[in-house]
Amino acid sequence: MLSFLALLFSIYLGYLLITSTPFADQKTEPINIFLATGFGLGVSSHLVLYNILLFDQLNPLAIILSHLKILLLFIVLRNRFGHHLPKNPSPIRNNDLPIFFLISTPFLILLIINALSSPYGDWDAWGFWNVRANFIFRAGPFWNDVLPTEINHHPWLLPLTIVWGWSFAGREDNLIPLLIPIIYTVSTVGLLVFGLSDYIEKKFALLAGIFLLSIPFFMYHSTSQYAEIEVCYYLLGACICLFRTLKYESIKYSFFCGAFLGLLSFTKIEGILEMILLTFLIYIYFLINQKKSFLFLILFLGMAIFSLPTIIVKCFVSPNLNHGLGLNWSLIGDFQRTALIITSFLQHVFWVDAWGGLWIIGTIMLFMKRHSLVQKEIIIITIFIFLFMFALFLRFQITPLYLEWHLSTVLYRALFQITPLLIFLIFYSVFEDRNLSTNRKNPQPHETN
Amino acid sequence: MNITQRIRSPKLFLARLFPVIILAFTVKNLIIDSHACLIKATTILRNPILPPGDKFVPLRPYLIGVRKVGYYTDQTSENPITDVNIMKDYQQAQYALSPTILDYYHGLNYELIIFNCSSKDCIEGKGGALRDHSFAPIINLNNGISLIRKLK
């Protein structure tokens, strides 16, 4: 029960932060609840880290108190200055949300069965992520001891979120690592559906959501308690906030776009790469299209605040692990490796049935709708996916590991990270409703409270 | 718009056909997912899932307050870090026994060593890892796993 409460507490905190920022708009859209889940859990992981650094060991009481302080602060600020904000900003009154959950129910049941069938997660869950949480929770002042298996020094969003739940519950309840991926999976699907609704008809956005949830590989891997689902979520969240920033010239969404980029960098090493790539592309886009520079500054501010824990963990907590695996640039001209990487990639995406037709449909549709991929802000996602693929190729080419093993363990996870974004791109390019996009620039009266 | 006009406008035709294709794939995926879940659910009901590294848990009381111990296995590989058989047991042991760190790479350099052996001779027998040392077994779990104190 306490484990549920811990996660609900984080989600409520996230929701309060998202709907009470000084620049919050007056909308009570369902998308806010899906932005709040991951944002709240991310904030909790940051608070745990700052507390551990402050006390040099885990102090559950201090962690709970710091959560309460933030909550109270925002409640007071909201009551004092938020007269323009809705009194009870509940997205549940919106009809779209019950419809979303009703249609998703069979898929959600399967998702929960999947999660329960692997209650301790797959290999990396107990081999890396949960064992790091065990360490932080059990080791007292030696919380940052380096494990001999930590050859890849990933940041700690997932372990710290687990530790937050355990600190609140007062024990190592396995329900926490089991529930976290379910929350992130549902939130990713919610973000996809309600993010796409800005551009395409709702029925098609809903179809995109259930298609994503039905992909056997997504269903299986999202509940394996790896950090990939968090990467999926923050990557998609950052892109959706970015689009809203550009569409509405919204200060709120530009800040949260930056915040999601910062949280993205705290998930995994790939998250850091994705944050850098996206920020660079956003900067270029702002520069070329002469967008308001203060929006980018706000975005950068959000990113700076929320990527601080990544910098702390990477540079100060365990700096000795920053050597990574040692890249070997002389392998760049090894055409045998290149051929093997390309063959494995093609074989993986087109022959593996677990992708549920995604790559076959995606390739055909994106080729036929190629002109819409380079229009307006969607070009950022298109270029990002190509750059990410290139970076992935480069990683396999120059990392001196046994290539077959490296490909078999990393390729599918990296592709998994961009799956929701790819579906966003496919549905956007096929169904974009220009009337809907234009109308959204001038919200109708019923859309505001 | 009749069928001839639709075919003349392939983009429009595609946009109309696309949801049907996606829906068909979604239904197909749902069938695959349901089948896989049914198998998983049956398996869990028959065999409850134990926590990873459960067989190492009896060593916990002996490692309270111990920060680092050695870990030794008689299984060998050219590249142990990518060897599933070696790493699975090792990482499960690490999960079960944390926050004590199990050093796989310099396993025999510690006073306390966890042995995970497939043969009886791997500790003291001919070619055993500790044949040149005197040692005192602390606990033997009789499943190839034992905790040893190295005396010299």
Image (cartoon, coloured by chain):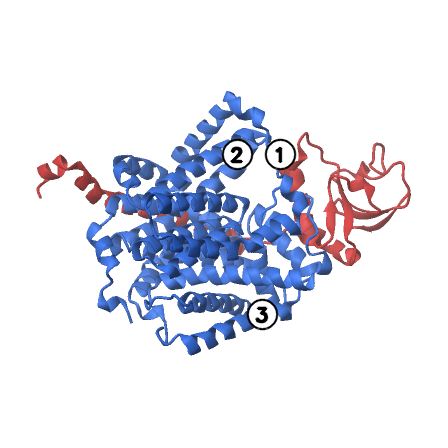
Chain colours: A blue, B red
Whether residue A419 is visible here, answered yes or no, is: no
Circle 1 packing at 10 Å, graded few (<14), some (14-19), many (20+), is few
- Label 1 sits on what residue type? Gly
- Give how far apart the Cα atoms at labels 1 and 3 are: 39 Å
x%, y% of residue A162?
Answer: 57, 59
Name the secondary structure under disc 1. loop
Q: What label sits on residue A395 in the rendered view? A: 2
Instruction: State yes or no: discs 3 and 2 in contact (Cβ < 8 Å).
Output: no
Residue visible at 72% across and 35% down? B75
Q: Which residue is mark 1?
A: A326
Q: Is residue B97 left or right of residue A161?
A: right
- Name the foreground residue: A179 vs A77: A77
Nearer to the camera, A445 or A84: A84
What chain is tagged by disc 3? A
Above or below residue A82? Residue A292 is above
| Among the two numbered marks 1 and 3 on one chain, the one whose residue lies closer to the N terminus | 3
